[in-house]
Image (spheres, rainbow, N blue to C red):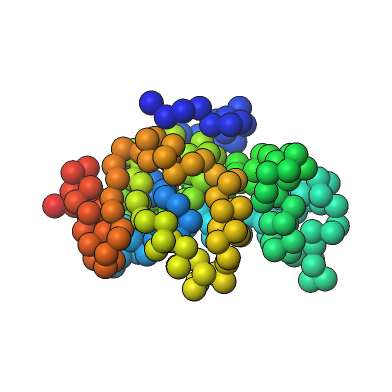
Amino acid sequence: MPAAMNDPSHVSEVYPVISKRIPVIGIVGGIGSGKSAVANWVKAHTDVLVIDADKLGHDALKSAAVKDALLHLFGRDIFGADGFINRSFLAKRVFGNSPEQLAARHDLEKTVHPEIGRRISEEVSLAMTNGRVAVLLDAAVLLEAGWRRLCDLVVFVDTPDAIRSLRVQKNRNWTEDELRRREASQWSLDRKRQESDFVITNDRDLEYAGRQLLEILRVRGAIT
């Protein structure tokens, strides 16, 4: 059984457990592990819907209700001249291990995670309506946020640290210190791996990892 999330009390009050007729498979792993690439490789080879929780999070920050709540919590400093939330500035407030950052991150997650969860539920329902064979939920903080309850199973993408570090340097222009600072806000990789139902290895070409995930879909009966 998965460990209890840090603050689960708000989850069931905001969005219901989905009565699923198709498999919903959560994809987790370290930053730079290639979760999105693997999920999208599978999407290119079978009729699944990939839900990008990070994108839903960006969209949630644009909603009036979330913006109002964060204005109350953090003040106008987190907003740019265009009226939208400055995510880089907000990241500096919430990523880190100082007491202030930990408290700020808790407030942010308590505000934004339920809204993302609601949007995930809507996307899964739409996938059913549109006849998709399965849903792949690509979500870095799936376990921390309590979204596992929306999934049939969770898959951990295991990628060596050296590969992940090179990827975030190339794709996000992050230093090694920035990678570690961001990952400190999430569960440890060991804990994520232990809480997952399957582990796939992404240390070679993308097809190698993608076919492992396809096999899991076959095991679940989503594809033949």
Nearer to me, 213 or 58: 213
Residue at (60% x, 45% y) in the render: 185
Above or below residue 137? Residue 204 is below
State the image coordinates of residue 163 (x, y, percent, origin top left).
Answer: 39, 63
How many marks can you see?
Answer: 0
Dividing the picture into quadrants, the one containing residue 102 is: top right
Q: Most extreme residue toward the right, as rendered?
A: 76
Residue 193 found in image quarter: top left
In the rendered image, the vertical position of residue 33 relative to residue 222, given as above or below? below
Q: Residue at x 44, y 37 (%)?
A: 191
Using residue 46 as the reference point, say whether residue 121 is left or right of it. Answer: right
Q: Farthest left residue?
A: 224
The residue located at (85%, 52%) in the rendering is 75
Percent x, y of residue 3 = 46, 28
| Residue in the image at 36% along x and 46% along y | 156
In-image side of 180 versus 197 (left or right):
right
218 or 164, which is in the foreground?
A: 164
Q: Position of residue 117 (x, y in %)?
A: 54, 44
Q: Is residue 112 visible?
A: yes
For this rendering, which residue is in front, 8 or 157? 157
Is residue 22 visible in the rendered structure shown here?
A: no
In the image, 60: left or right of 155?
right
Question: Split into 4 quadrants, where in the image is the N terminus?
Answer: top left
* Relative height, residue 180 to residue 106 (above, below): below
Residue 65 picture location, percent across and down: 73, 49
